[in-house]
Image: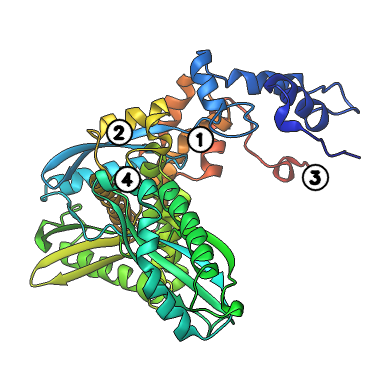
Amino acid sequence: MKQPIKGFSKLSKQAKIEWLAKEYLSNPNSQEDGSEMMELLKSYWHSDEKTQKLHDEFIENTISNFYMPFGVAPNFLINDKLCCIPMVIEESSVVAAAAKSANFWLERGGFKTEVLSTKKIGQVHFAWHGDSDRLKSFFNKIKHKFYEGTEKLSANMLARGGGILDIELVDKTLEEPNYYQLHATFETCDSMGANFINSILEEFSKILEFELKNDLTLDDSEKNVLIIMCILSNYTPECIVRAEVSCAIDQLQLGADIDPNEFADKFQKAVHIAQIEPYRATTHNKGIFNGIDSVILATGNDFRAVEACGHTYASRHGKYQSLTNVEVKDGIFKFWIEIPMALGTVGGLTALHPMVKLAHKILGNPNAQELMQIVAATGLAQNFSALRSLVTTGIQKGHMKMHLMNILNQLEATEEEKVKVQLHFTDKVISHKAVVDYFRELRGISTATPYEQRTV
Ligand code: MEV
């Protein structure tokens, strides 16, 4: 039986790998001693020691690196400026879909984007016993102390044009006895702001405790407060970016056998289905996040925060709905996204990870608002491509074309075999079985199942 290990994080990287190999990668019943796995882990170390050390120190207990493809989708015309978008993603068809959409809209005016608002939110959650009106007047009396007491912490942010925008006392006692919040809004400029906001909130909680304790007008029973927690909210419904594409319906030519009006109509219906049907909305929005997350990852931002925020926003009307909208009116097709997104172009990994730095450079070192617009355009592009395929050819044609290489790699096909198989499937339906069958045929291996091979 396995035993827990104490002090693992203090071991050297080599010792951690040896422990892992012994405990989890070797098999006492066979010759397997984990050495092959140790070699695999080490083969993913960066050849430059300094770069590897940087990666080791991003998290605790690093033993190796995990490669993800870093691709680019060129030809994104965003507010009349051409962008080449770096994307980190494992799903084979995503970059191809983004690039296809970018090319389509390049010819039709490109993406128009704007940031609608940039407020971030943080809350001190606390419990207090007493008359809530007395707490409200106490809060109004000492509200200025929250600003004064955090001046030092805010100084840099203030110099950059940001800081604390407002602090409110929110009475939540109807939902949870004695529960209140200090609900604060912030402007964090080009940083995502998590550290800034959390530090300010923790200071707010100390100020609240101190001021309550030392207030001469409060009774003893009113001087106590239980600080439950201080944390930013990843839900930022007032930090919104919008991206839009539009064109005349007759410009929606997608091929000889697809009528632009019919396409616009089916496309509109598909978006409406995602607005009324959560099963579809989830997949629809997942496709949007294929684009969004891959740029967020490439630019060193927090994709979990952006996802969580987007999904909450998608449910803001009490039901999970599409993040994109469409309008087909007066001969014009208009398709847009409005989505909250808290991004940073300074701080975090942005100044540390060499590939993240490169991604920012490819994008022309955007500020946070510019990055929000690039990301929103990529999400919209991704959704356009997905819906375009879904309402015309079906998704599998393009998807399997891109997945073909994964199947061939699984089969350990040679370069020559890959070319032959790709050529063979240019005009055929690709399925896993069809590829395996053709591949076996190429190698002269019978494709018959054991059942079919049986001689009666
Ligand atoms: C696949 O990763 C994403 C799609 O399913 C999105 C969609 O259905 O809209 C193609």
Secondary element under disc 4, as helix, strand or loop, is helix
Point 43% across, 53% down: residue? 200
- Mark 2, mark 1: which one is toward the viewer? 2
81, 266: nearer the viewer:
81
**Picture quadrant of residue 449:** top right
Say which residue label 2 marks.
360
Give the image location of residue 39, x and y in percent.
Answer: 68, 18
Toward the front, the furthest residue is 216
Question: Which is more foreground, mark 3 or mark 2?
Answer: 2
Single out the mark in the foreground, 4 or 1. Answer: 4
Q: Which residue is mark 1?
A: 406
Where in the figure is residue 17, as x and y percent of width and height? 72, 24
Q: Which mark is residue 456?
A: 3
Q: Residues within 10 Å of mark 3 (few under 14, many from 20)?
A: few
Per the image, the residue denoted by label 4 is 155
The three-letter code of the residue at mark 1 reads: Asn
Ligand 1 quadrant assignment: bottom left
Q: Nearer the viewer, mark 3 or mark 4?
A: 4
Total count of labels: 4
Q: CA distance from mark 2 to mark 1?
A: 29 Å
Sequence-first disc among 4 and 1: 4
Name the element at disc 2.
helix
